[in-house]
Image (cartoon, rainbow, N blue to C red):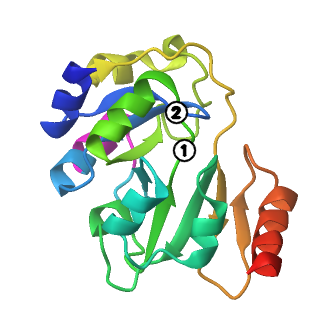
Amino acid sequence: MNGVVEALRAGAPVVLPFDTVYGLAAEPHHAESTQRLYALKGRAATQPTALVAADVERLAALFPELPDDARRLLPGALTLVVANPAQRFTWLTGSSPTTLGVRVPELTGPAQVVLQELGAVVATSANRPGEADARRLAEVPEEIREGAAALVDGGALPGTPSTVVDLTGPEPRILREGAVSSAEVLRRLQAAVRSS
């Protein structure tokens, strides 16, 4: 995995197996790395991309404003949209610098090793906008595989993307139902409130 970590640290995008689908990942601390990821994916600069951390503690270190609701839902197959009052990581926020997407996946194998080593990456699905998510490395579009600095094969993945939950309003709002059902998201939040 050393070559994958070195490629990411050098600002190059790589393809990694996440807990849901294959993702295109880059180093999150420099806008140039994100721009290279966007160019390879064919993603508009106005679209946001998630900050993906190895664990909740590292996410909170990078993003101290992480709300309690987010901490209650992570880790898992969720992308959470949270308020970003300090406008951190604006190169990941697309056209909305006051919000940020965050994720802490439950990983095993090579992707876990890479994420633990780096602490965090910026990541999006390894497909073209509007096309199907990749369950297998061979399903990642050829131009993305050829343009990535490294490819990590994690075998067949579940194939359902993360559920996207907006936590910026008075009530949580499901923006995209995916690997975690809306009912499960609400159940977990309510259970956390009852136990606090």
Does the magenta portion include 36? yes
Tag 2 near tag 1, CB within 8 Å: yes
User: Which residue is identified by label 1?
Assistant: 105
Q: Secondary structure at mark 2?
A: loop
| Picture layout, residue 121 above or below residue 190 | above
Magenta extent: 35-43
Residue 39 appears in view: no
Q: Residue 57's x, y, as percent?
A: 42, 61
Relative placement, left or right, of 45 versus 140 is: left
Disc 1 residue type? Pro
Q: Quadrant of the N terminus?
A: top left
Q: Residue 186's x, y, as percent?
A: 81, 67
The answer to which image quadrant residue 15 occupies is top left
Instruction: Please give the name of the residue rendered at 73% of the width and 46% of the height, measured from the top-left corner.
Output: 178
| Picture layout, residue 70 above or below residue 68 | above
Disc 2 residue type? Phe
